[in-house]
Image (cartoon, helix red, strand yellow):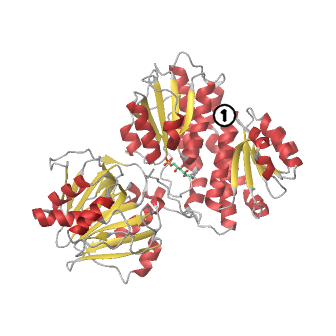
Amino acid sequence: MCGIIARIGHGNATETLLSGLENLEYRGYDSAGIAVQNGSGVKVHKCSGEVSSLKSTLDGRPSGNMGIGHTRWSTHGPPTDENAHPHTDTAGDVAVVHNGVIDNYTELKADLREKGHEFESDTDTEVIPHLIDEFRSETGDTELAVRRAVDTLEGSYAIAAIVDGEEAVYAARKGSPLVLGLDEEEWFLASDVPAFLDHTDDVIYLEDGDIVVLEPDSYRITDLAGEPIERPVDTVDWDPEDAGKGEYDHYMRKEINTQPTALANTIEGRIENGDVAFERLPPGSFEGIDTVQFVACGTSYHAAMYGGQLVREAGLPTEVLRASEYESTSGPVDENTLVVAVTQSGETADTLDAVRKATDRGARSLAVTNVVGSTAAREADDAVYIRAGPEVGVAATKTYSSQAVTLALLSQRIAGDVPEATPVEDRAAMLEALEDLPRHVETVLEASEADALARDTVDSESFFFIGNGLGRSVALEGALKFKEITYEHAEGFAAGELKHGPLALVTEETPVFAVATGGVDDKTKTNAIEAQARGAPIVAVGPEDHPLVDVADEHLSVPETHPVWTGLLANVQLQLLSYHAADQLDRPIDKPRNLAKSVTVE
Ligand code: F6R
């Protein structure tokens, strides 16, 4: 996890580094720091807390035309000032920021200590500037020293370094994302594009093993042996506006409210003549596939459940696996298995690891992701983009909706390609209804009464979310969102499971949100009634004329549509419920404690 940034060019780097770090805070916000070169040595400024704390500790704006910055999600050592990045060597000549985990840092630290190096932090990162310093003393050549240093590291890293008296930024990546941004008069390096999107949309996605040297008027990429490497320049099509908060108090609110646009983008051009059309995956692309495995974490796992159910209903053996449990839960895999990695960021370590394990065994891989050029997209055999636009709020909202829609479309593409599978019986109606989904989301956003309901229920002891069929994915997602941003106890259940244990927890202090999709949700109704009989207030989340609404105490209404899409509308109501409850409780909605958006550690 963590976000890193570097900038070199003319004029002062500090402002750019700080605003870039703010755009990377979704990756971690335990502590922040920058180092700049100002002609009188490398100056490091860092502290625990968010980038705003760092800004308030800066006396004016440290000057220097080049610098590096970091926003941290702690792995080694608590979020203290000492553990904040950048870290330096003993003399303070080499400053480094790092995203990743160095597995052999204990051994390296012991060796370096014997050579006289002194350490100040508990971090794994601190060995890196010391190593660079050590190899610089041996070789007198910083670029060579950086290559040697990273060659010594085991684990994952994206690093950027500056060195006293040198007009250069040195960087390297292995296993953690790093993107090079190219403007006319300045170069950037960052963990993700939004860090420098205000300046340029021309990027080079660096690969594992790349070493980069940025100088004011040139840049070069080499491999570990120092051989030059050419990488293509891509243009990202995200608008800088997309990455900001706009008129909203929170990114999460903005991202919930912009779902109609996100969904319209997800769908655009993907329904042609009553069939599903995926760019670069023409009809026939999935011929020969006899099993589908979805691997994902958190919210993406819930979206995978949604898509997985539709592939299973099409008649293909399907597994939806938590990526972190892949080894112990995966069935047999061979070249006829399609492993679908569902990952908004495309960088989740558990998901990448599961896909690598599946492909090592011969499976074919497909990444379903929001981030063009992400590791998942680059490593998989094929990639489908969900086109939701940048999501900054740590709690995923619009990307769940766009993922679920993309996976539903994928299920029909696969079903069309595989002779043993059958597409949904009323596929034309389902696809037609999809074109209305953005409009229906708009209706939910305009008419939702989730705010009032959140106010009425926020003091409850526990919050339960139930559903069956496609509604189960929505119930689990509703509970995850609720606990993540309100810090209140919330659980999601397959409705039928309630009576097998959790019912013991149900009291009049346990509102039960029951998701009605209009598909198979008989069990949701019967189990909701059972919970109600034990005193629980029932909130039906679904269309007006659903039988669940007749028995419920409260109702969050969604427009009538095809049952494949109703759950996604119910999910928007639950997103709003979580948002308003968290707002009532005055929680830091965009940055829930202990979490980060992109989880690049296992
Ligand atoms: C919850 C949330 C997380 C992510 C999970 C996977 O709101 O955002 O549960 O869904 O960390 O992340 P990606 O989709 O980037 O693989």
Q: Residue 99, located in which quarter of the rendered image?
A: bottom left
Residue 476 visible: yes
The residue at the point 69 percent across, 51 percent down is 491
- Across and down, in percent, residue 250 comes to 57, 63
Relative placement, left or right, of 525 versus 246 is right
- Across and down, in percent, residue 348 comes to 45, 48
Q: Residue 64, located in which quarter of the rendered image?
A: bottom left
Ligand 1 within 8 Å of disc 1? The answer is no
- Across and down, in percent, residue 133 comes to 19, 67
Residue toward you, 247 or 513: 513
Residue toward you, 352 or 191: 352
Relative placement, left or right, of 188 versus 534 is left
Is disc 1 placed on a helix, strand or loop? helix
- Across and down, in percent, residue 124 comes to 35, 62
> What amino acid is labelled 1 in the image?
Val
Residue furthest top as drawn:
419
Residue 545 visible: no
List the residue tagged with mark 1. Answer: 564
Residue toward you, 463 or 261: 463
Relative placement, left or right, of 150 versus 323 is left
